[in-house]
């Protein structure tokens, strides 16, 4: 989607939200806000955390939720590679960077800047404190930007509600040392801030603010509970290039680059607890909906784990073979192009034989992963095949039991505890030879294309 369309969608949301809050704002001010948001959210690495995502997370019924969603991902250091230049004026007075790490300034004017003090108090961040990527760094920085940009437009009482919703999007948190859930902790913080800053929010408004934050946070991670694992994995694949920037260059990223990206995601999925994904607070959402979210997320995680482990094992064979050619072999050299099949030089899967007695899935989980490998994720993406032809063939050849047996050995290869040749020796020899034959034929096809209309060079009439 182009800038103009995204800008108009964002502006429409801002106009609607301010109207719902009965706030009189010049459209020129909202236009500048929309421009700032869209410029940032359309950064080159924003595949998942995009304009489409923030519009979806905000919903369409609550003005505070809409506003919070527009800002909740505006800072994402790991995706953008840095703090976007156009947002630095809002953060520089309060945050300093030292060797790639971010700290709250000890000489900051926090006590003189009410908005920063409000945000820092809600996030429980102190002067001199280091901000860590996976414990709220991006959400805290996004909340500061939101508060400073909205300060000329909204009252502090409204801004704190927006900031509370952004705080709630810090994901995957456990209970506090006092046994409080993240939402209960937020409620206690809001009560304290309400008194300290004389916001005059009623007890009903405080409770509703936390419930609102729960709705927003659950939409933010709603993909985990999608009824289709194909859609869930499509969203997962959009995350890969955000923190693995080499994947954007689909024609040149290496076999190892691809494995690193898959491996990081596999580790994340392995240790993620489904019960830490979604939030609830005093009946929001109700037990039936919450249990459904958790159960569906647990199922999607099971599918993702087997899917990713299968891909890692299959690609371990390819990576080990690629090391016979060099240390930085592009994946397309081994697998073929990701583009239109008619315009490509062919693909490795073109040379796989049809298996008469292939292994079949034995459980419902295996059947679902089998269908994903063969039929593909829900959406295509530029840096990878939608389907998994190599993994699908390997699973057909050795079965999911074989995948499980090879997994540990593949990890030892990745960790360089064994050599690539030792790993290949541990694999089914016939399977490896089929893949070798396919890669060789793919390379031969490239050789034929390279040598088309070849004529020996001549210099001064002398044939070389």
Image (cartoon, rainbow, N blue to C red):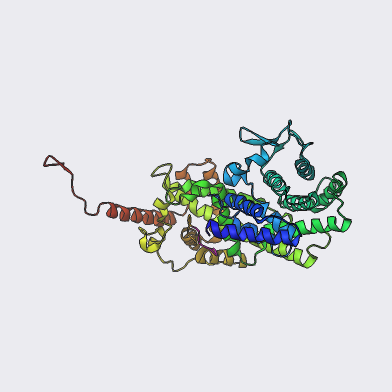
Magenta stretch mostly in which secondary structure?
loop
Q: How many marks?
A: 0
Residue at 71% x, 47% y: name it. Answer: 143
Where residue 86 sits, quadrant-wise, is top right
Where residue 287 sits, quadrant-wise, is bottom right
Instruction: Check the image and name the residue furthest to the top.
Output: 107
What percent of the width, then of the height, locates residue 230? Answer: 58, 64
Question: Relative to the observer, which residue lies in front, 116 or 56?
Answer: 116
Q: Quadrant of the C terminus?
A: top left
Residue 12 seen: yes
Question: Relative to the observer, which residue lies in front, 83 or 236?
Answer: 83
Instruction: Indicate whether residue 256 is drawn in magenta.
Output: no
What percent of the width, then of the height, locates residue 275? Answer: 74, 57
Q: Is residue 373 left or right of residue 58?
A: left
384 above or below 88? below
Range of magenta residues: 377-381
Residue at 39% x, 53% y: name it. Answer: 436
Residue at 65% x, 51% y: name it. Answer: 73
What percent of the width, then of the height, locates residue 145? Answer: 68, 45
Q: Is residue 398 left or right of residue 228?
A: left
């Amino acid at each position: 989607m182009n800038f103009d369309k995204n800008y108009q969608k964002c502006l429409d949301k801002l106009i609607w939200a301010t109207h719902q809050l009965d706030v009189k704002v010049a459209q020129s001010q909202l236009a500048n806000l929309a421009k700032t948001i869209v410029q940032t959210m359309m950064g080159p690495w924003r595949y998942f955390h995009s304009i489409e995502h923030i519009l979806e997370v905000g919903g369409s019924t609550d003005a505070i939720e809409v506003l919070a969603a527009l800002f909740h991902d505006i800072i994402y250091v790991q995706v953008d590679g840095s703090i976007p230049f156009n947002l630095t004026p809002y953060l520089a007075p309060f945050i300093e960077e030292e060797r790639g790490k971010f700290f709250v300034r000890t000489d900051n004017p926090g006590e003189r800047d009410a908005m920063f003090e409000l945000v820092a108090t809600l996030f429980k961040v102190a002067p001199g404190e280091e901000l860590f990527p996976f414990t709220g760094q991006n959400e805290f920085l996004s909340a500061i930007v939101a508060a400073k940009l909205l300060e000329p437009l909204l009252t502090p009482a409204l801004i704190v509600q927006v900031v509370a919703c952004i705080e709630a999007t810090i994901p995957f948190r456990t209970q506090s040392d006092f046994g409080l859930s993240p939402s209960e902790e937020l409620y206690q913080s809001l009560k304290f801030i309400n008194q300290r800053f004389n916001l005059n929010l009623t007890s009903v408004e405080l409770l509703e603010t936390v419930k609102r934050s729960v709705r927003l946070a659950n939409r933010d991670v709603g993909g985990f509970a999608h009824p289709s694992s194909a859609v869930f994995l499509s969203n997962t694949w959009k995350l890969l290039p955000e923190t693995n920037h080499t994947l954007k260059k689909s024609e040149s990223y290496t076999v190892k680059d691809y494995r690193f990206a898959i491996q990081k995601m596999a580790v994340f999925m392995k240790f993620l607890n489904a019960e830490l994904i979604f939030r609830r607070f005093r009946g929001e959402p109700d037990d039936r909906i919450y249990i459904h979210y958790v159960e569906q997320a647990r199922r999607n995680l099971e599918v993702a784990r087997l899917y990713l482990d299968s891909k890692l094992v299959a690609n371990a064979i390819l990576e080990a073979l690629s090391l016979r050619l060099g240390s930085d072999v592009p994946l397309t050299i081994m697998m073929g192009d990701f583009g239109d099949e008619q315009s490509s030089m062919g693909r490795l899967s073109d040379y796989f034989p049809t298996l008469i007695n292939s292994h079949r899935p034995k459980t419902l989980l295996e059947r679902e992963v089998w269908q994903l490998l063969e039929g593909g994720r829900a959406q295509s993406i530029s840096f990878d095949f939608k389907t998994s032809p190599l993994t699908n063939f390997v699973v057909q050849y050795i079965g999911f039991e074989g995948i499980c047996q090879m997994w540990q050995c593949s990890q030892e290869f990745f960790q360089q505890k064994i050599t690539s040749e030792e790993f290949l020796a541990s694999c089914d020899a016939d399977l490896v030879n089929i893949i070798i034959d396919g890669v060789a034929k793919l390379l031969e096809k490239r050789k034929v294309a390279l040598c088309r209309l070849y004529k020996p060079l001549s210099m001064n009439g002398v044939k070389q």
